[in-house]
Image: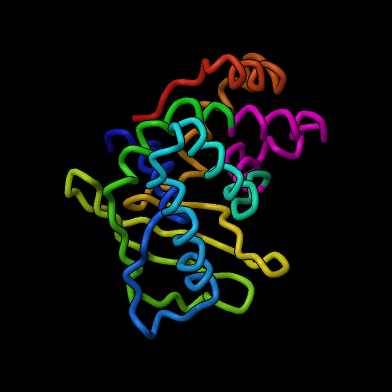
């Protein structure tokens, strides 16, 4: 799938950026949180007084609250995560996040300005008071639609995202083979250095 990670990043922005077309019977707390987030962040995206870097900075502040970067990173690395030291985990998370933002944020932000999203009336039997999957359909500013599903869990009063599936492809697994290949050849510190140097192959 072309520009797959850009779609994932766009999916992240959608969590905070869009007016949701939500049916009355879609009332799970995770869906309600998405709807509540949309109003304030739409003001950021449509604020002509802000530059794109300023908009991205504010959107990322929301992401820091609503995305579980540690869990996303652990799932992206896979079984090797247990071999990371606490400091390596911290360094990897920071470098991974910075790489994705620098690669995809500007193009995804432009796509988010005119995109639309629908929360689908689709139930997951595994949804509970602490875990949920929210199913959506995103229509890009080029009028192309694709399915995006958000896997979430409750942490205190906040629902946090730990995985996104775009057309069935998982955010947390797309880089796993590449990460593990680098670890085998260069070690964990070599992987962190590659992330910091933006030397990871871009997923398209």
What colour scheme does the image use?
Answer: rainbow
Dominant SS in magenta: helix
Left or right of 167: which side holds 84? right
Q: Residue at x 53, y 68 (%)?
A: 33
The span picked out in magenta is 71-97
Position of residue 138 relative to residue 112, above or below, is below
Position of residue 29 relative to residue 178, above or below, is below
Residue 66 figure quarter? bottom right
| Image coordinates for residue 43, horizontal then vertical, percent | 44, 52
* Number of disc labels: 0
Left or right of 113: which side holds 132? right
Residue 6 figure quarter? top left
Nearest the viewer among 4 and 14 is 14
Q: Residue at x 30, y 55 (%)?
A: 138
Residue 197 figure quarter? top right
Nearest the viewer among 135 and 191 is 135
The extreme right residue here reads: 86
In which quadrant will I find the N terminus? top left
Left or right of 179: which side holds 133? left
| Image coordinates for residue 180, horizontal then vertical, percent | 59, 28
| Image coordinates for residue 182, horizontal then vertical, percent | 59, 20
The extreme left residue here reads: 143
| Image coordinates for residue 3, horizontal then vertical, percent | 32, 33
The extreme bottom residue here reads: 25
Q: Residue at x 53, y 75 (%)?
A: 127
In which quadrant will I find the C terminus? top left
Task: Specify whether residue 84 is painted magenta.
Answer: yes
Q: Residue at x 48, y 67 (%)?
A: 133
């Amino acid at each position: 799938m072309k520009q797959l990670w850009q779609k994932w990043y766009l999916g992240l922005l959608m969590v905070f950026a869009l007016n949701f077309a939500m049916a009355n019977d879609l009332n799970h707390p995770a869906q309600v949180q998405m709807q509540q987030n949309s109003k304030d962040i739409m003001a950021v995206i449509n604020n002509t007084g802000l530059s794109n870097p300023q908009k991205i900075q504010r959107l990322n502040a929301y992401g820091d609250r609503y995305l579980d970067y540690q869990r996303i990173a652990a799932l992206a690395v896979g079984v090797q995560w247990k071999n990371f030291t606490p400091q390596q985990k911290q360094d990897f998370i920071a470098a991974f996040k910075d790489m994705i933002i620098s690669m995809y944020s500007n193009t995804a932000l432009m796509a988010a300005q005119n995109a639309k999203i629908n929360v689908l009336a689709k139930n997951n039997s595994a949804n509970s008071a602490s875990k949920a999957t929210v199913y959506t359909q995103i229509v890009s500013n080029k009028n192309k639609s694709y399915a995006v599903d958000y896997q979430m869990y409750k942490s205190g009063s906040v629902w946090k995202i730990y995985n996104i599936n775009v057309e069935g492809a998982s955010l947390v697994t797309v880089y796993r083979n590449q990460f593990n290949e680098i670890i085998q050849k260069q070690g964990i510190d070599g992987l962190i250095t590659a992330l910091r140097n933006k030397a990871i192959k871009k997923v398209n």
